[in-house]
Image (tube, grey):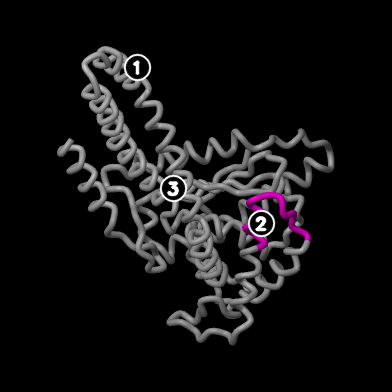
Amino acid sequence: MSRRLYSLTFVLLLTACATSPEGRPQLVVPTPLQGFSAVYSEFDMRLQLVTATNAPSCREAECAADRAFDQRILAIGGRLADVAYRQYPALHLRFPRFEFIVADKVDAGAASSAAGTVVIYRGVRRLELDDAALAFVLAREMGHVIAGHHDENVTTSILVAVVAQILLPVLNLARGAAAAFSSNAATTAAATTAASTAATTTAIASAASFAGSRALRASDRPQHVREAETMAMKLLVAAGWDGREVSDQLEALRPALPEELDWTAELRESALHIASRMQGPLLPEGPEGVGALGRIAPKVPGDLPSSMVGEPF
């Protein structure tokens, strides 16, 4: 038991010494588990795609509109990826490129993984976003990747799983011991009960860790979204978009967004937050002539690398 507690303490110490690009303290997986983090988040993203409703097959003009949307995603995504790798050079150590994919899902939505994959659902096309608003959607999802939010989610799952595997067997052992010492007559029955309980301990621990990690991740989600919004606006301004134009487009879009979907509800909230930030005075120019959320639209250097994007499917 002491060895398990030491292991838990060691994991906790390893996951308490990082900060996000915005300076927020965060939990991250130990370096030896970073590969596992990428695989786990990729699996989690694929699970979201599997459970989302597929869009019906397109026909004629609808197919042409889908192809045009795919090309917009690739063009805007490539522009943002170029800037992201310039602003955050350490990204090259985590994954070699961003990959942008359009998934044929009927609802509007987006997903991403720690490996740099960004997925936009086909339903986003039906929102008829202009380039500024669509760029914000992509940049916000990229913000989750850059800020290491997926790594935080994986760390949360690991810690909850460790706690569940330690505490549940201990509780079962304590209950079995109490039953055994209650009376001599009950010893055999207690042993039988303990044996049958031990057979299900692993399943119970897994279910508890899954539910617990989902609950903790849900509680962290609002903070993650706010941070991703800030990083998205910085990416957009650095890529040449007008921050106030982006805000105006999101604000105009907000009344038409459906409220019943979690993703569109988050986008509505993002539009409100960005609009409230843009109501103040323009921010001063930074060292490169770029305000954090201001109106400045710098020229993108001409020697940018080729777009690091993937083909949609």
Image location of residue 17, percent across then percent down: 27, 59
Of residue 216 and residue 89, the one placed in the foreground of this image is: 216
Horizontal side of residue 39 vs 242, given as left or right: left
The amino acid on which the numbered mark 1 sits, given as a three-letter code, is Ser
Of residue 216 and residue 267, the one placed in the foreground of this image is: 216
**Mark 2 or mark 1: whose residue is earlier in sequence:** 1
Check disc 1 and report the residue beneath it.
196
**Mark 2 or mark 3: whose residue is earlier in sequence:** 3
* Disc marking residue 114: 3
- Above or below, 298 against 105 in this view is below
Asked whether the residues under the numbered discs 3 and 1 touch, taking CB atoms below 8 Å apart as contact, a structural biologist would say: no
Image location of residue 238, percent across then percent down: 52, 71
Disc 1 on helix, strand or loop?
helix
Instruction: For marks 2 and 3, give the CA distance.
Output: 23 Å
- Above or below, 190 against 45 in this view is above
Q: Residues within 10 Å of mark 3 (few under 14, many from 20)?
A: many
Disc 3 on helix, strand or loop?
loop
Give the foreground label among 2 and 1.
Answer: 1
Residue under the point 32% across and 33% down: 168
- Above or below, 177 against 86 in this view is above
Of residue 177 and residue 207, the one placed in the foreground of this image is: 177
Check disc 2 and report the residue beneath it.
265
Residue under the point 34% across and 21% down: 197
Residue under the point 66% across and 56% down: 265
Image location of residue 261, percent across then percent down: 68, 49
The amino acid on which the numbered mark 2 sits, given as a three-letter code, is Ala
Q: Main secondary structure of the magenta part?
A: helix
The amino acid on which the numbered mark 3 sits, given as a three-letter code, is Ala
Residue under the point 52% across and 41% down: 45
- From which residue to which does the magenta span run? 256-268
